[in-house]
Amino acid sequence: FSSGVPLYVMPLDSTQLKLDEVKRAFLFTRGTAVSDQLAILYHLWAQETPTLFDPMTLEFVLRPDLCPVTGLHIRVDDKGFTREEPGAVNAQVCLNSNPENFFQFYLRRVGER
């Protein structure tokens, strides 16, 4: 936290985005190299509804409005948990994402031909 590099945090609460059956059907029928590879990985995974944690973090770089941030003072405790505590802001944290807007952007970008 003391490096001086701006810290942006996308905690699990804001990145638990479920790729449901309708979205999977749309994405997996796009016929692009990326969508075809995602379909293969999905079938190898052999579970039903994937949770997309990392894509929100990547989308934040392109569209920060999809996961607005709040300045907080956070620390990592002895057990590895990130905790908010009183103090000067040391991180910008996304507390609430917008799943509908996220998927509109994600599906359009990943499914582009």
Image: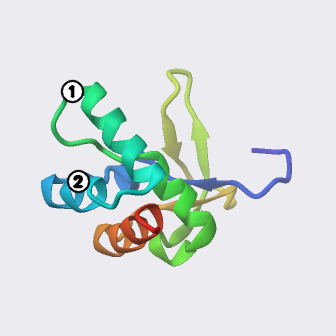
Q: Is residue 94 left or right of residue 15?
A: right
Q: Where residue 58 sits in the image (x, y, percent)?
A: 56, 56
Q: Are marks 1 and 2 in contact (CB under 8 Å)?
A: no
The local crowd at label 2, few if under 14, some if 14 to 19, many if 20 or more residues have their Cα within 10 Å, is some
Residue where numbered disc 1 is placed: 46
**Disc 1 residue type (three-letter):** Ala
Quadrant assignment, res 106: bottom left
Residue at position x 35%, y 75% from top? 101
Q: Position of residue 6 (x, y in %)?
A: 76, 58
Position of 56 with respect to 99 (left or right) is: right
Q: Secondary structure at mark 2?
A: helix
User: 21 or 86: nearer the eye?
Assistant: 21
Residue 45 placement (x, y as % from top left): 28, 27
Outermost residue, top side: 79
* Residue sticking out furthest to the front: 31
For mark 2, what is the residue?
Answer: 24
In the rendered image, the residue lying farthest to the right is 4
Give the secondary structure at mark 1.
loop
* For residue 32, above or below residue 51: below
Q: Amino acid at mark 2?
A: Arg
Mark 1 neighbour class, 10 Å CA radius: few under 14, some 14 to 19, many 20 or more: few
